Image: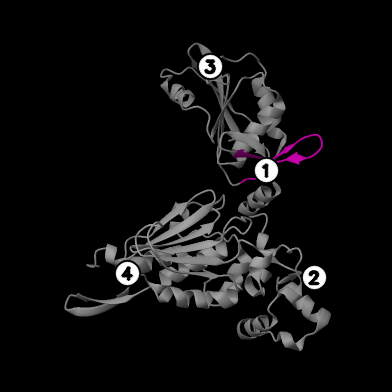
Amino acid sequence: MQACPEKQTQEFAMPERMERILEKGESATAEFKQDSVRNEHLAKELGALANFRGGMLILGVNDKGKPVGLTRDDNEERLQNICYNFEPPLQTAITHERIRGKTLLRVEIRDNNEKPYAYKSQTRNIYYIRSGTVSREATRAELRRMFQQSAELHYEALPLNNTSAETLNYPLMVSFFQEYRFIRLEDYFGEEQQIILNNLSILHEEMTTFAGQLLFGRNPRKHIPAAGIRVAVYKGDNKASQVLDHHFFEGPLTEDTPLLFKYLSLFNAAKFDNIQDARKEAKDYPDEAIREAVINAICHRDYTMKGSGIMIDLFSNRMEITSPGGLPNTQNISKIKMGMVYQRNPLLVQYFYDFRYVERLGRGILKIMQTMNENGNPEPEFSDGTTYFKVVLGKRDAASLSK
């Protein structure tokens, strides 16, 4: 599509299609307006839809969803000017449709990876978002999240207020960099050491970065409330069942990650099966699938979301790993199953590569699927929401053992 409306005129032989749209009413992806609305209001609705997941604006419909028709002959020109007043320009297509004897104008905005879109008002750039059926200006946190999802901002590398090198676990850093980067921090002092930590993106000038605090902080949750990983073990197959055990991992990732996997191994029983006259040992879940799912959650979660941390729930028949933040604009579940890679937090990925938990090829999702299949588990499930990404690993007992 072009970066302006592309005009089409269509007399619908079957008006039911538009009838269904009007019957459903306004939604997160559909907005109705009369064409008497001011340009600023049109820009607000179009920008919010574009920054969401695309959608449609129907002109010529009143607040009750009743077609009233168009009253202006300059609607296409208005839309063209509005589209070009966005940065980047909005990509839309319009169709004139007749229904119940009234002409309506349907403006479609497709979802794409050009977000976020800013409307250039006379005084500033405005970023609108869609919240249910309401269009509004994005908050600072929402705007940061949109830029991160567009790959134009890596939140992990930003400085963290009210922090300094003193808030980091120095012995832990010395040990890590000597073992994995062959850097002896203790051989450097003062400004020279600070320069090295800046080059390693642990510090940003005199403040720690988000990544530095997550990896080596003395108390990461004090400065990043959403940091940490919560694990809960349930007796049954839902959260209403008895909690058998739970643990919170709130320390630096370079220290807590090995402890987390050691803890999870306590609930991953190994069993022997007689298959074709041979005894074969297999765990409830393949270790590699657990590792890949957990590291994926740590490295690719959205750290701009402050409400919750990573959650790992072990039920009687499955394990669920949920991380804040859905997939970024350029990704979907079909793409990640094919091995397409996007790194929301490339700095964390690099450190976990040094830590020998990830590889550069980015085959994590493929490895989960492969090892689950080889172990005789059900096919893993992946779900992507606006505020979360979830991996569900089915327990081996729930699958056929004939593989």
- Quick check: 336 above or below 122? below
Residue 65 in picture, x, y percent from top left: 52, 21
Q: CA distance from mark 1 to mark 2?
A: 30 Å
* Residue located beneath label 2 in the image: 206
Q: Residue furthest left?
A: 277
| C-alpha gap between disc 4 and disc 3 | 57 Å
Please tell me the numbered disc located at residue 193: none
- Regarding residue 19, the answer to whether it shows in the image is yes
Residue 374's mark? 4
Q: Are marks 4 and 3 in contact (CB under 8 Å)?
A: no
What amino acid does circle 4 point to?
Glu
Earlier residue among tags 4 and 3: 3
Circle 1 SS class: loop
Query: What's under tag 3, amino acid-wise?
Result: Pro
Other-residue count near label 4 (Cα within 10 Å), few / some / many at <14 / 14–19 / ≥20: few
Q: Residue at x 59, y 59 (%)?
A: 344
Q: Marks 1 and 4, how far apart in space?
A: 46 Å
Which quadrant holds residue 250? bottom right
Q: Which residue is mark 1?
A: 138
Is residue 363 located in the magenta-colored stretch of the structure?
A: no
Which segment did they paint magenta? 114-130
At 24% from the left and 64% from the top, the residue drawn is: 400
Q: Position of residue 229 (x, y in %)?
A: 54, 66
Categorize mark 3 by other alpha carbons within 10 Å: few (<14), some (14-19), many (20+): many
Q: Is mark 1 in CB contact (under 8 Å) with mark 3?
A: no
